[in-house]
Image: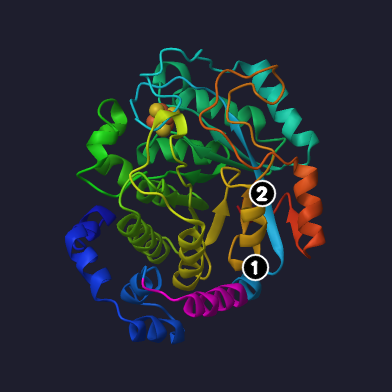
Amino acid sequence: MSFFDLLQKYPATELLQRFEQVETRDIDRALTRSKLSIDDFLCLISPKISDSQIETLAGIAHRITSQRFGRTILLYAPLYLSNECHNGCKYCGFSADNHDLRRKTLNDDEILREAEHLHRQGFRHILLLTGEAPEAAGVDFIEHVVRLLSKRFSSLSLEVFPMSREEYQRLVDAGVDGLTLYQETYDQKLYPDLHPYGPKSDFKFRLEGPERAGQAGLRRIGIGALLGLGDYLTDAFYTGLHARYLMQRFWRTQVTISFPRLRPAEGGFTPRSFVSDRQLTQLICALRLLAPDAGLVLSTRENAELRDNLLPLGITQMSAGSCTAPGGYEGDEGEGEQFTISDHRTPEEIRNILAERGYEAVWKDWDGAFVDQRT
Ligand code: SF4
């Protein structure tokens, strides 16, 4: 069964009714489970949770994270290759509707300059990003960039448009080991309103992208919803359902989950719901209980204080020193940001903060050579 088929078994109206029915004792019972059912997870993200129950939840999440991951945080940085895009996502600064944005795809020299900047800062894991414009930054271009950078970095991940299984396979063969593909919202009725044209308007093709990537042997697959686009509770539930599905189906692949939050009026777009710090904390802890081995990722969208406070509760990966414009690390201004970041600390500052709190910053936890040695 594909995840699309599984999703149809959990209509939003029924979920919202179930959220209404959750009682204090359901939450207490979920907190005692050694292995959560999907209904337990629903109870743990319920708005009816009390402050003392959240404290208990946070304590369990902290214990599980310490047992599974120790006191380490993997640091990574995004490298934006292109801001050209044919999609009209209503919440994104790179949307084709943004006619004021100077469009730019980096050439080899610019890519190497940006990559060297990140390498000098210590990064060995980088995330390569594009919009969706195949003639400017399609699969051939991405494969070329991966081959250009694979000797300098131990891990190259992609956050680009969804592809066929064969295309993912080509990129795995070139040296890609990770993929991030946010569904943005799992609400099938709302999705076309937010993605009115362009290839991204195909909800099902995007939803099934992580499965095709799993079939192609990607070592790390990241999912998430852009919180605030749709109804928070249902998108949070579907994110957990999706993570659990992928973990069961692709047990050799590490699943990671991100929690990007839209802030009010970001890029002129008004979020449908505002996700509070309390809700975000509750979701991170509940996901840790549902998926004890999942990597949980927090980006520089969130402010420094919140990122520091969420550290012990389940986070295992963080971006640092990020710039969301192509050419923005070494260029004067870059070519237009996708979104504004909130944590402006340098990677060095973040490393020092982690150390002060007893955490070790990990710049490299994987090398493609591990695979080469086995073959
Ligand atoms: S979210 Fe991605 S696909 Fe949509 S407009 Fe922005 S860059 Fe393009």
Label 2 beta carbon less than 8 Å to ligand 1: no
Q: Main secondary structure of the magenta part?
A: helix
**Residue 115, percent from left and from top:** 69, 29
**Element assignment for label 2:** helix
Q: Nearer the viewer, residue 358 or 35?
A: 358
In the image, what residue type sits under mark 1? Phe
Asked whether 54 falls inside the magenta stretch, the response is: yes
- What range of the chain is rendered magenta? 48-64
**Residue 199, percent from left and from top:** 29, 29
- Left or right placement of residue 205 versus residue 345 in this view: left
- Left or right placement of residue 108 versus residue 142 in this view: right
Q: Nearer the viewer, residue 131 or 328?
A: 328
In the image, what residue type sits under mark 2? Ala
Residue at the spot of label 2: 304
Q: Quadrant of ligand 1?
A: top left
Among the two numbered marks 1 and 2 on one chain, the one whose residue lies closer to the N terminus: 1
Classify the position of the N terminus by image quarter: bottom left
Residue at the spot of label 1: 69
Q: Nearer the viewer, residue 85 or 336?
A: 336
- Left or right placement of residue 197 versus residue 352 in this view: left
